[in-house]
Amino acid sequence: MINICNNISFKAIAWLFLTHYPLPMMQSIKKPLSQNYFHKLNGLCYTDNCAFIDKIQTMQCAALIAYYRLTNRKSHLSKVMDHIKKEITEFETTLLVLEQEALNAIKKKYQMSDIVWSRCLYDIQQTKQSYITGMTQKYTTVIHDEKIPHNIFEILITLLKKNNINPDSVHLHMISDQEEIEANPSHIAYTKSFINVLPENGIEKDLNISHDYIPAEIKLFPRITNCQLTTEIASKCAHEIQHLVQQHALSELIITEYLYYYYGIDAVEFKKSSEYQRLSCIHEAQAEIFSATKDAYIAECFKVMRLKSYYPDHLYEEHFFHISTIAMLWKVYAWLEYFY
């Protein structure tokens, strides 16, 4: 019996070696060298590449479950589970670091003074905190469009509540403008946030941005009704709601106002810059990865969606690798939780 167990354990370890990274050595956001190649393809053979990654992740999942079951006593599994959760949260930590680097790159590109930049960051922080509080409250002016199908509406409401957002603090609209629909043939949904720039403040005439919450919007294109899988609808909704949770639009809006007010850089010029594009890509990755790290079901929803579709000019195989890794880790966690 001991020889059989040792043989199985050896095979598990062998699988771990073949799939590149035993969990204790894994660095969550750091991709294998093959991903550098995948990332450059920009959509070419995307589904084939992701199918290959998915197969590797499936083997990795099975190998990790077998490895931990055979090499750890039941009393030690809780420590392993804590380690897995730590691995999952490291995705968030790394993306926050990358976001900060992207913000610093914007400051450097436009040679923003330390004083102006510190004021900008202060406004971003204070406005985000105010908006997070504001989204827990009810606003009588908020509209929920009756044209939104019931099943989609219920998913939106459930996810908003799950993320500590009062549904009555966010407008929910189904887009009916045909020109907007035709101008965005691949879009399913988007969020829109607003800020209020007040009259000039003080003798120095500094930029004065109100921190008071203005209800945001989640706008859906009618083509969302073509999504046949509940997982796809859930992933689309979770993506937009996470943008609100992180208040990504506020960072971009406030930086845009500061660049125009103090340096004469308009929004069009700013959004053409590689620095803005970098920040935008990080925000789009955060919208999915942050959601996936909080919820195993949502992680699986994103994995299923991104297995077949990429986000043009933003998210490709590299992102799928990260999402599928999170989903795989959640599966390992669930199995160990069952055994524990």
Image (cartoon, rainbow, N blue to C red):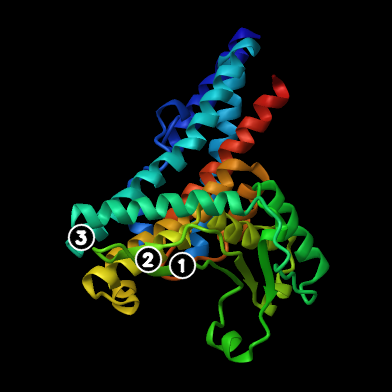
Crowd band around label 1 with a 10 angstrom C-alpha radius: few (<14), some (14–19), many (20+):
few
Residue 177 image-quadrant placement:
bottom right
Say which residue appears at 65% left-offset and 13% top-offset.
74
Q: Is residue 30 above or below residue 277?
A: above
Badge 2 marks a residue whose secondary structure is loop
Residue identifier under label 3: 112
153 or 326: which is nearer to us? 153
Residue 198: x %, y % from top left: 42, 68
Where's the C terminus, which quadrant? top right
Residue 97 image-quadrant placement:
top left
CB atoms of marks 2 and 1 within 8 Å: yes
Residue 269 visible in image: yes
Residue 316 visible in image: no
Q: Which mark's residue is nearer the viewer, 2 or 1? A: 2
Amino acid at pointer 3:
Met
Residue 173: x %, y % from top left: 68, 74
Q: Earlier in the sequence, mark 1 or mark 3?
A: 1
36 or 278: which is nearer to us? 278
Residues under labels 2 and 1: Cα distance? 8 Å
Amino acid at pointer 2:
Leu
Q: Give the numbered dot on residue 41.
A: 2
- Residue sticking out furthest to the bottom: 179
Q: Which mark's residue is nearer the viewer, 1 or 3? A: 3
Say which residue appears at 34% left-offset and 75% top-offset.
267
Badge 1 marks a residue whose secondary structure is loop
46 or 323: which is nearer to us? 323
CB atoms of marks 3 and 2 within 8 Å: no
Say which residue appears at 61% left-offset and 32% top-offset.
332
Say which residue appears at 51% left-offset and 52% top-offset.
246
Residue identifier under label 1: 45
